[in-house]
Amino acid sequence: MPEQQILRVAVPAPLYHCFDYLPPADADIERLVPGVRLRVPFGRGERCAVLLEVVTTAEMDGRRLKRALAVLDATPLFTPSDLSLLNWAAGYYQHPIGEVVANALPVRLRKGEAPVSVLQKTWSLTPCGRLQDPSALRRAPKQAELLALLQASPGQRLTQEQLQQCGTYRQTLQVLQQKGWIESGEGMPEAAPRPSPSASPPLNTDQQHAVNAVELGQFGTYLLDGVTGSGKTEVYLALVERVLASGRQALVLVPEIGLTPQLIRRFERRLGMGLAILHSGLAEGERERAWHLARLGQASVVLGTRSALLTPMPRLGLIVVDEEHDLSFKQQDGFRYSARDLAVIRAQRSDCPAMLGSATPSLETLQNARSGRYQHLHLTRRAGDAQPARMDLLDIRSVRLEAGLSPLLIQMLRQTLDAGNQALLFINRRGYAPIMTCHACGWVAQCRRCDARLTLHAASRLLWCHHCGSQRRQDDKCPECGDTDLRTLGQGTERVEEVLANWFPDVGIARIDRDTTRRKGSLDQLLNGIRNGKYSLLLGTQMLAKGHHFPNVTLVGILDVDQGLFGADFRAAERMAQLIVQVAGRAGRAEKPGRVLIQTRHPDHPMMQRLVRQGYAAFASDMLEEREAAAFPPFSYQALLRAEAPQESAPREFLEQAYALAETLSTGQVELWGPVPAPMERRAGRFRAHLLLQADQRGELQRLLARWVSQLATLKSARRVRWSIDVDPQEMF
């Protein structure tokens, strides 16, 4: 029997195995290389799949395989090392390989569409144009300038992008083309010019030590632990420049690229045209083009959010994860991976360094540094002459507040504004008020689909659920008793802004939250207004806490963080401390001293005292001791099985069967906690429940998961629920 080639492919489907197909009838065998896309029949339809390997066999085991329909790519989109990383991630995070591979592709390519072209429009001199003398065009200075520019360029060719950077030449190009001196064409983008050393500011001693400590060309993980404003970005840039000089590529991950436009501009100024930006806010074609440029090695630097980690880069020489503690690096639905943790694995497989940077490192990363797995680098002082802001706790017990503002904080705001400085107020709740209630009967506006109260957005007169997104018009009278005396409790950014406008009518107020920055470019406008002095009072949610440099902010007021002291999640205190330090870091970033006031009803709480008096490092040390005593991560390893369904009993029934299955497969090294209702049991009309698995050894947990997860779909109750597995969960919502 002649040998038969079988194509093993990853099909985007919620199934934990690959699928085998015969090659297309008219396929060129040389194009059947792992990493190409195939169109395959699947069920009653067709899917776009990715070829993982070609298996040659003489026996079909009685199987009747379908034939793939077509090969969609002339060359592979993934290298074998890319596919190996994706396969590892699918195994570790217990997610179907087909969906993991699809997650690494741009949206258009997942649908089976043809790749966008990466060629750029170019202009070059014709033989006639090369003979022309620009000095002879005295009456046409623009033509002379453009002609000289083309004659001086390498290969006497310039791209459309290069010409746009030099000025507006559209009409001049048309004139020269009509004369027959230039012609248009298409070509690959030029590699970015190496930045001039003079463009780099001098590094201080700590920064230079951090740069020197990183050994390029070999794997190592480094924690860059630097106080806010210490110049971590300059360390990143210096390392990226060294990587580019060696002919390799760099990948820089940030939590939310839309919130850090200043960072993008700094990279663009320093690194030129070899920068590819990758995030969900881009148009599909624009994002895919940047993806291809990185895959082909044309983009020297990729700057992006979580999903950029999976971008193929053939010459990867450095991975940077900025604000590594940020929750945004953990995917919370679908393929639930941690971009920070997977970045370390990718760096190891690429034999290059990974740098994790933060002013408030996560406890997992700190423990890795303590144990010697990561090299701990410190930036202990702020860049320039800036000094750390003074932090004080403001006791608001028995104090009459106005929209959450104490009289002392209002007084401090007035003094700051009178001195010509800017002040920032932080409250991590948007909208006008989190509660609307009837004063007569006690009715409270509740979401009909969630176990949550509706938040009033006064500007739009909407009651809005921030969990499922449902909205309805604000009530004019109580739906239960008909009384019109409806009142609000608590405050959000809208209400604080209203009070500030009354107290400071002549002061520009910039409110930055999801509501005020929905339109494209609105955040940039607000940030530019802050830098230009248009706004002296800054108010917002955690969007204001990430990466912004406001040199004139000398006072920061934090209105409400007490819930972090008593949260049900064991990570609540850690997240609270990180948020306080990050927000406080916006004050005193230039030569002016800064001050931070934290309003609290628990000023004597030991955790709060430790953070304010001794800093984040001391706080984190205490928290690590508590975690170790309780055997919580990072001293143990967890996986969370979630289940949800429209019927209240279905999730619990499924999780009880899953529990029983796990007990039969377990060797006794993995603890099973639950099943229990989720902290918010009903969300978006579905009831939810959890089953938590925990082990002292990661390997023990992984061995159980590998046998258990693939069998969950066979349980009788599995069809009645929507379930998911989350390895190393970061939230227990």
Image (cartoon, helix red, strand yellow):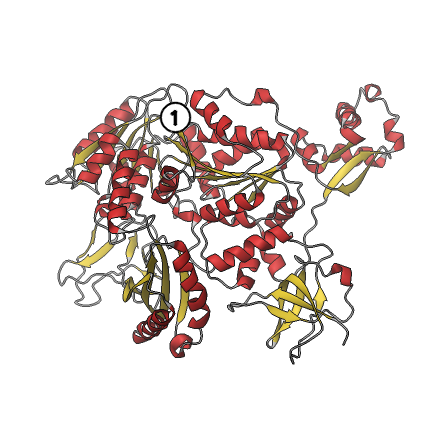
Quadrant in the picture for residue 86:
bottom right
Which residue is pictured at 59% across the width and 21% down the height?
197
Quadrant occupied by the C terminus:
bottom left
Asked whether residue 114 is in view, the answer is: yes
List the single residue furthest toward the bottom: 62
In percent of width and height, residue 266 lies at: 52, 31
Which residue is pictured at 66% across the width and 79% down the height?
64
Task: Name the foreground residue: 292 vs 90.
Answer: 90
Task: Name the foreground residue: 213 vs 472.
Answer: 213
Quadrant in the picture for residue 155:
top right
In the displayed structure, would residue 264 be above or below residue 719? above
Residue corresponding to mark 1:
551
Quadrant occupied by the N terminus:
bottom right
Task: Name the foreground residue: 66 vs 213.
Answer: 213
In percent of width and height, residue 599 lies at: 21, 38
Task: Name the foreground residue: 87 vs 48.
Answer: 87
Which residue is pictured at 86% across the width and 30% down the height?
129
In percent of width and height, residue 561 lies at: 25, 43
List the single residue furthest toward the front: 667
In percent of width and height, residue 242 lies at: 58, 29
For the residue labelled by badge 1, is the local secondary structure a helix, a strand or a loop? loop
**Circle 1: residue type:** Pro
